[in-house]
Amino acid sequence: MEKVKFIDLKSCILQENDDTAAEVRKYTKEKNVFLWNIMSSPGSGKTTFITKIIELIGNQYRIGVIEADIESTYDSEKLVKLNVPTVQLRTGGGCHLEACMVMEALKKLPLDDLDIVIVENVGNLVCPAEFDIGADFPMMLLSVPEGEDKAIKYPLMFTVTDALVVTKIDALPFFDFNFDALNINCKKLNSKLKIFSISAKTGENCDQFVEYLLERVNNKIIKI
Amino acid sequence: MEKVKFIDLKSCILQENDDTAAEVRKYTKEKNVFLWNIMSSPGSGKTTFITKIIELIGNQYRIGVIEADIESTYDSEKLVKLNVPTVQLRTGGGCHLEACMVMEALKKLPLDDLDIVIVENVGNLVCPAEFDIGADFPMMLLSVPEGEDKAIKYPLMFTVTDALVVTKIDALPFFDFNFDALNINCKKLNSKLKIFSISAKTGENCDQFVEYLLERVNNKIIKI
C-alpha cells in the first residue's frame, strides 16, 4: 500500500520566500541601496525611531521608507511630511511582511536616487521573525515599558536580528528594567547581537547607534 | 473542461476552529466555569493584570489560569506562587492560541473546583484576534506607552473584544496618550466596546473593572 503523501506547506512558503529574499538582495546590490528591516512589538516606537534617524543622517544619506501596516496610512503620512519617498504596504490583516511584498515596494521607490531604504515591518514580535525579506540589516526594537523578559518569551526575533535597540530609556525612572538580565538572556540566544539603548525622544545615545549603522551602510554601498 | 478546484485553507482552518470553540463553550457551560480570554501586545502587562485580579477576587472566586507562551514557563511560575492551578501551553513558535489548544488545557485543570479560568493569550495584537477560543469574555489590554493609535493600525482586535482595558495609567505623566482619540477610534470599530483605564501596579480604577467583570461572571455561572 502506498504511503500517504505529506506536503509541508510551511516549508514550501518559507522556501519560496527565501528564494525571493535572495532576489531582493541581488536587486538592491545592483541598485547600490542598503535595505534595513526594523521589527518590534506594536508601540515600541518604530516610527519615532525612524523619524529620529532621518533627522540625524538625512542630510548625508538619501533615505526612502517602506511602511507596512495592517490598515491605515497613519505612519506613512508622518514620513511624507519629512519629504522622504515612502511606499505604504497595506497587509490587510497579514501579520508580517514577506520578501515578495518588499520587492513590489522597492520597484515603486526611486532607487537610483536613494542610499538607504528603511522597512518598518508590521508591529509583531512573533511572525515577522520567520520571514527573511532580503534586508542587509535586520534589527529589532524593544521598549523599556515592555520589560526585559521578552528575550525569554519571544526568542526567535532575538536570534534572526543583528542588533537590538532598547528604546524609551527616558522612561527608565518609571519602569523596572533589568539590563543585566536582558544582556545575559540575549547572549544565550545570539552571541553576536549588538545591544544599544537610546531615547529617540530626547536623542540620548542615538549617536552610538548611528555610528554602528553608518559603518554597515558604508560597507555595502558606494556613496555617490 | 472541469474547473480547477480551489481549497481556501484559511477558511478551513477557521471553520474547524469555530467548531471546536463551540465545543469549548458547551464544555465550560456543563462545568459551570467562566472562560476569560485576555489578549494584547507583548509587554502590555497581562501577567501583572492577572496577578492583580487574583489578589482582588481570589478570596471570593476560585480561579485557574491557562498561560500561553511561545517559549518559557516564565509567567506561569509567577502564578503558581499564588497557589493558582495553572497550565502552561507552549506554542513552540505559534503566534496565537486556537480553540483545540484551550480544550486540551481545560481538561488538565480541576474544573469542578473552579469558577473562572483566565487565558493569557500569546502576546500579539494581530493573530490571536482571528481565532475564537470559545471564551465567554474576550478582552484586550493596551498599555499607555504603546499609544492610542493602535485602534487605527490593528483594528481587528478592537472589533472581536468586548472590553478594552488601558493599563499602566500611572505612567501617563511620561507619555502622550490621547484618550479622546482612542474613544473616537474605538467607537467607530466597535460601538459596544467597554473601555476602562487602570494601573495594576498602583491599583487605580481596578474596582470599576472588577465590578463589570463580576457582573459578567455572575450572569454565566451559578456560584456554589
Image (cartoon, coloured by chain):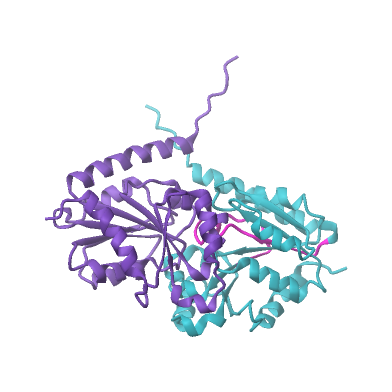
Chain colours: A purple, B cyan
In this view, the residue in front, B69 or B113, is: B69
Q: Position of residue A100 (x, y in %)?
A: 32, 45
Q: Residue furthest left?
A: A224
In this view, the residue in front, B10 or A76, is: A76
Per the image, is B133 magenta? Answer: yes
Magenta residues, as a range? B114-139
In this view, the residue in front, B40 or A44, is: A44
Left or right: B156, with A211 as reference point: right
Q: Using the image, determine if residue A159 lies above or below residue A170.
A: above
Residue positioned 47% across, 49% down in the render: A190
Q: Is residue A88 visible?
A: no
Residue positioned 26% across, 59% down in the render: A214
Q: Residue furthest top?
A: A1
Residue positioned 58% across, 51% down in the render: B70
Q: Using the image, determine if residue A1 lies above or below residue B198.
A: above
Q: Position of residue A201 (x, y in %)?
A: 37, 76
Left or right: B149, with B12 as reference point: left
Left or right: A61, with A77 as reference point: left
